[in-house]
Amino acid sequence: MKKLILSAFALALAGTGLAAEELPAIVPIPQKVVADGTQTFTLTESARISLPRADKALRRAAEIFARTIAREENLQLKVVGKSPAEIRLAVDPSLGEEAYRLDIAASGIDIRGGSPAGLFYGLQSLRQLLAQYGTTLPSLQVEDAPSFGYRGAMLDCGRHFFTVDEIKSFIDLLALHKINRFHWHLTEDQGWRIEIRRYPELTRIGSQRAETVLGNNSPVYDGTPYGGYYTQKQVRDVVAYAAERFIVVVPEIEMPGHASAALAAYPFLGCTGEEYKVQTRWGVFPEVFCAGKESTFEFLQNVLAEVIELFPSEYIHVGGDECPKQSWKVCPACQQRIRDEHLKDEHELQSYFVLRMEKWLNEHGRRLIGWDEILEGGISQSATIMSWRGATGGIAAARAGNKVIMTPNTHCYLDYYQTEHPEGREPWGIGGYIPVEKAYALDPYDQLTDAERPYILGVQGNIWTEYMGSFAHVQHMALPRLAALAEVGWSYDRRDIGDFRRRMEHLRKIYRMCGYRYAPYFFETAEAGK
Ligand code: TNX
C-alpha cells in the first residue's frame, strides 16, 4: 500500500493549495516556505536574468546558473545588465551574509541575497524547483539562511589521486548542496599531491608509489606504479573555480604524522635520515617528521609559505592525527628538544610542534585547524579542532573555549558502508556502517550547553579514499549521505527524516541529470516501505 508520510513541515503547507506530492522539495530544507500555488510562472526560452549592479562575482554566479539550467532544463537563459527580466537578482544587505529570499509570482522570479553568496544559494534552490516542477513553477516564497557557517566536505587525494576535472565535479556537487568548504587533503603516507617549487622532490619522488596493496591490506600487491599531483597552476584554477561557487578551499598539509611521502623525498626530515619509501599499504606508520631538528620546521614553514600564497583560506589544516611517537622516543634531537623546552613527554613534544606551526601561521595572518589529537599535550586557545574520534574531542575543545568542526566517525565518515550487510552488494569500503539516516541524525551540539554552542563552527563529511580508486566510487560513497550532512549543517533545527525522503526523490533527478553515481540503498528502503 502506498503510504504518504508527511512531516510537520509538509502538514503546515498541506492546506495551502498544492497537493502534498506537489509541495516544494528543496534540499537542504529552507527556513520557511509558503506555497499558495494559486498562480504560476513559466520560464521560456527567451527568459533573462538581471543583475543589480556590475558585480563580477554575481555575474559569474548568474552565468554558472544559466549554464547549469541550459544542461538540465534545455533553456538558454540570458544574463542581462538590468531589468526588464524574468529572473531578477538583488543584493539586500538587511539579510544575513548567506541568507536569501526567493519569490515566485505570476510576474516573475525575484531573488534577494544578503551577499552574492546568498544569491547563489537562492539560485541553487531555484535550480531544484525547476528539476521538480519543470519550467512552469507554482507561486511560492522561500526565506532561507544556514544554521552553521562552516559546512564542509573533505576529499582525500593522498591515497588516491583525482584529476582536476574530477575535483571540479566534486566542487559542483558541494555547490548543489550549499556546502561552502572544500577540505582538500593533499599529503599522505601514500602520496604527496601538491607542487612545492622550493622542494621539487616532494612531487618527483613523493607523489609516486611503486604499487598498491590489494583489498584490505592483503598480502598481495597490484604491481603497478601509481601517482599524480597538482601543479600550482592547477591548484589556483581549482581555488578560483571553488570561489566562483562560494566555496573556500581549506588545504591540509599533514604533520607531524602521515609523512612517509615527504620523508621519502627528503630523508633529512625524519629522525634517522635513513631510506624512507612512499607507502604502498594503508594504515598508520612510524615514519614521522623529526621534531628535534630545526631543519624540519624550516622546511615546513617554507612549504606553508607557498601554500598560503595559493590558498586565500583563513584556515589552514595541518593534520596532527595519528602520529606514532616511537621514533621521537629514541631520537637524540627529539629528546634534546624535550629537555630544552622543559616538556614532559612526546605528547607535549607534539604540542610544541603544532604550536610552533600555529605561531607561524598566525604571524602570516592565518589560523590553524588540526584533528582532535592536537588536544593531547595541550593546545593554544586559538586553534580550531576537527573532532573525528567521535565527538569527545570536540566537546572537550568547546568546553575549553576552542572552536570546533564536528566530523565524528560515528556519523560523518563517508568511507564506511551504507548498508548493514554490504558483502556482495556494496563496492569495497573500509568497514563500519553509517546509513543515510545515521548521518542525518548527527547533532553537532550534543551534550553542549547554550554557552558552549557558539564554539561549534559547523560540520563536515570526510571521504577517505584508501578503497576508492575511482571518482565514480567517491560519488557512490558521497551521495546521498552528503545531502544528509548538508541538511544538518544548513537546517540544524528543522530536520525531519520523513520529509527529507520525500525531497530526496526530487534531488535524485538532478543527480541523474548530472550523471552522479549515487548509492541507491536509501531510495530502495523508501520504496520497500511503501
Ligand atoms: C582515520 S580521520 C584517519 C585517516 C583514515 C581514516 C579511515 C583521521 C584524521 N585519520 O587517515 O583514512 O581514519 O577511515
Image (tube, rainbow, N blue to C red):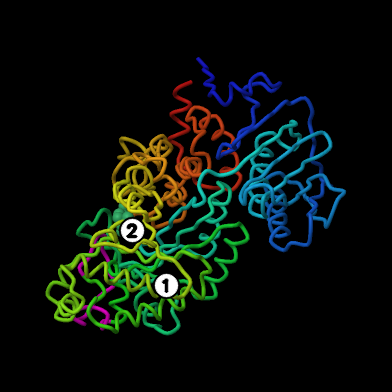
Q: Which mark is residue 361?
A: 1
Ligand 1 positioned in quadrant: bottom left
Which badge, 2 or 1, comes first in the chain's sequence? 1
**276 within the magenta span:** yes
Within-10-Å neighbours for mark 1: few <14, some 14–19, many 20+: many
Q: Is residue 503 left or right of residue 482?
A: right
Q: Name the residue nearer the viewer: 401 or 462.
A: 401
Q: Residue at x 72, y 49 (%)?
A: 92
- Ligand 1 within 8 angstroms of badge 2 C-beta: yes
Q: Classify residue 125 by image quadrant.
A: top right
Residue 75 image position (x, y, % from top left): 76, 46
Question: Magenta region's main secondary structure?
Answer: loop
Residue 130 image position (x, y, % from top left): 69, 39
Q: Residue at x 29, y 47 (%)?
A: 392
Q: Which residue is mark 2?
A: 371
Q: Is residue 524 above or below residue 283?
A: above
| Badge 2 amino acid | Trp
Within-10-Å neighbours for mark 2: few <14, some 14–19, many 20+: many
In the orientation shown, which residue stands out farthest toward the right? Answer: 84
Q: Classify residue 275 by image quadrant.
A: bottom left
Q: Classify residue 465 by image quadrant.
A: bottom left
Q: Is residue 202 above or below residue 9?
A: below
What segment is highlighted magenta in the picture?
267-286
| Badge 1 amino acid | Leu
Q: Label 1: state its secondary structure.
A: helix
Q: Name the residue nearer the viewer: 26 or 342.
A: 342
